[in-house]
Image: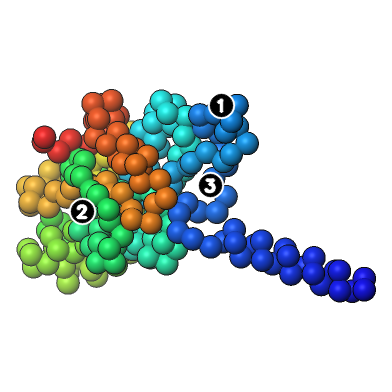
């Protein structure tokens, strides 16, 4: 009899665990955070919102998310990474509320699976050619990236928009094969390119303008007219698997509010014209 009671207790625990894990919504552990309460709801878990964001957007996204949280009382959490990593996570988990990739083209995989409920363009992503302070390798034009002995860092084209952009740019001007011989690292995120530059492990890299804004004391920019045609657009999308679509839409709209644009501009982004 004692053994039967123990078995029943274990089965009960297993069934409870299955019920908790079932469904599409916020990542387990994200709910139950503090939000607006009253006497009737103080014991009920308030909604929280999970944002997927490109790693290069981390600082403005966190600052804007914190402002929304302070304004509404709803908890905002984040997952940052390269576009390929984030797309895989969204498609596999079918969880989360908002998505801000570094380029609108990165929405395609989730849109094809009908996971985008609403979207809006937010800011422009401007690519630049950066070198360590003092420009030790004497880089003055795009073709210099192919000179013998120059160490180049580029984004991984399979992982992030800046890597795809750099390869497209170099391919267009017939430099990709030559420059690839000088590439010493391909990084999954744009932020890692800044690390290689600022520590002088590499002589040059194509990064985003806002990445430079956070490392002005260690980097300098080289004027490359060819990059002007490669400006990208950052969107914000509400995911169809969100269990809080109305609240998620409010947060998405907040990312394009006047208050949010002050934050975007502080970090070097140019708002999309309305």
x and y, in percent, of residue 64 in the image? 36, 33
Q: For label 1, count other residues whose C-alpha is less than 10 Å away and answer few (under 14), some (14-19) or many (20+).
A: few
Where the N terminus falls, by quadrant? bottom right
Horizontal side of residue 98 vs 21, given as left or right: left
Residue 104, numbered circle: 2
Element on which disc 3 rests: loop
What residue does disc 3 label?
A: 30
Residue 250 visible, this angle = yes
What residue does disc 1 label?
A: 38
Q: Is residue 45 above or below residue 35?
A: below
Element on which disc 2 rests: helix
Q: Residue at x 57, y 61 (%)?
A: 21
Residue 218 visible, this angle = no
x and y, in percent, of residue 41 in the image? 57, 33
Residue 82: image quadrant is bottom left
Question: N-terminal of the two: label 3 or label 2?
Answer: 3
């Amino acid at each position: 009899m004692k053994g039967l009671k123990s078995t029943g207790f274990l089965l009960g625990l297993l069934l409870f665990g299955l019920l908790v894990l079932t469904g599409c919504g916020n990542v387990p552990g994200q709910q139950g955070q503090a939000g607006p309460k009253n006497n009737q709801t103080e014991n009920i878990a308030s909604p929280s919102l999970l944002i997927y964001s490109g790693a290069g957007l981390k600082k403005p996204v966190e600052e804007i998310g914190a402002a929304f949280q302070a304004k509404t009382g709803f908890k905002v959490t984040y997952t940052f990474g390269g576009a390929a990593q984030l797309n895989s996570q969204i498609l596999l988990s079918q969880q989360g509320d908002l998505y801000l990739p570094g380029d609108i083209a990165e929405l395609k995989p989730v849109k094809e699976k009908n996971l985008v409920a609403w979207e809006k363009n937010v800011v422009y992503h401007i690519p630049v050619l950066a070198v360590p302070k003092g420009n030790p390798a004497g880089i003055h034009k795009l073709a210099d990236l192919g000179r013998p002995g120059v160490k180049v860092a580029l984004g991984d084209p399979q992982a992030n928009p800046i890597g795809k952009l750099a390869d497209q740019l170099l391919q267009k001007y017939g430099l990709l094969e030559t420059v690839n011989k000088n590439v010493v690292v391909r990084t999954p995120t744009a932020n890692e390119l800044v690390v290689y530059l600022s520590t002088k492990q590499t002589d040059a890299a194509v990064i985003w303008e806002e990445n430079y804004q956070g490392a002005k004391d260690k980097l300098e920019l080289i004027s490359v007219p060819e990059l002007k045609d490669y400006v990208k657009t950052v969107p914000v999308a509400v995911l169809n698997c969100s269990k809080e679509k109305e609240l998620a839409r409010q947060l998405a709209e907040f990312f394009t509010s006047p208050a949010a644009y002050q934050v975007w501009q502080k970090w070097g982004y140019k708002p999309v014209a309305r």
